[in-house]
Image (cartoon, rainbow, N blue to C red):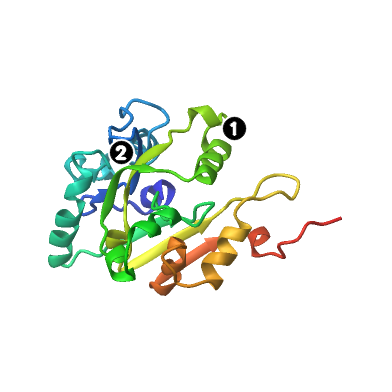
């Protein structure tokens, strides 16, 4: 993104960024922005900072803190009233979550409509396989570094997307990978509230994936 925006000299003063999630404790208190494990740190150092003069204004950068996340619905609805387009950029989780909206949350809802109306959650309890996934992808296998809770948007926001851009790159070395089953289930099952990612193919946009994830899902002898 940084490469192309700078190559084409496209300013981002019109952009409003909404981070979908952030690590937290069970009360929704998030990691400080200077913590290298936080998503805010990643955004500032990988996107907003490198864009330089083209960057998104600071007052238009939204992070999923306990104070700010509950304001997302109002802010996004106001922007959409003024013809803004909501683009949801996501990856599919190991157990098919979107952001940190986990499959086991479905047990708390009596209907699909009630589930779809949930906009966010503070101090969400993460699935054990989500912990494992992030230990592999972000924490050099240090499972004990991965928080057990996070703040996250819910289907009441990510299903409002005017366009989606999804990605699956969970390919490891020597033929190993962790995201193939998650991709296959997303594309072939539901949509069902127990498989949050299964709703994303019903929305307009694109999903990019590494060819190795397309199967077959069998071990090679």
Q: Return the x and y of residue 102 as percentages of the image width and height.
A: 42, 52
Q: Nearer the viewer, residue 150 or 63?
A: 150
Label 2 Cα crowd, 10 Å radius (few <14 / some 14-19 / many 20+): few
| SS label for mark 1 | loop
- Which quadrant of the figure has residue 140? top right
- Residue 16 numbered tag: none
Residue that carries the numbered disc 1 in the rendered image:
141
- Front position among marks 2 and 1: 1
Q: Does label 2 or label 1 sit earlier along the sequence?
A: 2
Q: Where does residue 156 sit, x and y in percent of width and height?
A: 27, 61
Picture quarter containing residue 40? top left
Direction right: furthest residue: 221
Q: Is residue 161 visible?
A: yes
Using the numbered discs, state the Cα–Cα distance from disc 2 to disc 1 in whole angstroms.
33 Å
Measuring from the top left, give residue 73's x and y in whole percent.
19, 56
Q: Residue at x 38, y 53 (%)?
A: 101
How busy is the neighbourhood of tag 1: few (under 14 within 10 Å), some, or many (20 plus)? some
Q: Is the C terminus in the top left, top right, bottom left or bottom right quadrant?
A: bottom right
Write the residue at 39% across / 59% down.
106
Q: Is residue 210 left or right of residue 52?
A: right
Residue 21 point in image, percent of width and height: 34, 45
Q: Are marks 2 and 1 in contact (CB under 8 Å)?
A: no
**Rendered position, 63 above or below 210:** above
The residue shown at (49%, 57%) is 96
In the picture of the structure, the residue carrying the numbered disc 2 is 52
**Would you place residue 191 above or below residue 220 in this image?**
below
Residue in front for this viewpoint, 61 or 29: 29
């Amino acid at each position: 993104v940084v490469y192309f925006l700078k190559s084409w000299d496209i300013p981002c003063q019109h952009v409003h960024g909404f981070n979908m999630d952030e690590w937290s404790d069970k009360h929704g208190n998030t990691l400080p922005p200077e913590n290298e494990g936080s998503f805010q740190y990643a955004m500032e150092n990988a996107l907003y900072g490198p864009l330089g003069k083209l960057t998104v204004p600071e007052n238009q950068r939204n992070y999923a803190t306990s104070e700010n996340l509950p304001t997302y619905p109002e802010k996004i609805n106001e922007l959409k009233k003024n013809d803004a387009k909501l683009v949801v950029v996501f990856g599919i989780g190991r157990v098919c979550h979107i952001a940190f909206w986990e499959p086991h949350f479905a047990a708390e809802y009596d209907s699909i409509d009630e589930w779809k109306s949930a906009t966010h959650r503070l101090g969400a309890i993460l699935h054990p396989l989500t912990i494992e996934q992030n230990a592999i992808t972000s924490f050099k296998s240090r499972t004990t570094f991965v928080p057990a809770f996070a703040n996250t948007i819910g289907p009441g926001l990510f299903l409002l997307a005017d366009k989606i851009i999804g990605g699956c790159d969970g390919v490891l070395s020597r033929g190993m990978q962790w995201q193939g089953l998650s991709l296959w289930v997303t594309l072939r099952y539901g949509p069902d509230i127990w498989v949050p990612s299964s709703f994303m193919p019903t929305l307009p946009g694109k999903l990019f994936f590494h060819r190795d994830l397309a199967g077959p899902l069998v071990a090679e002898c």
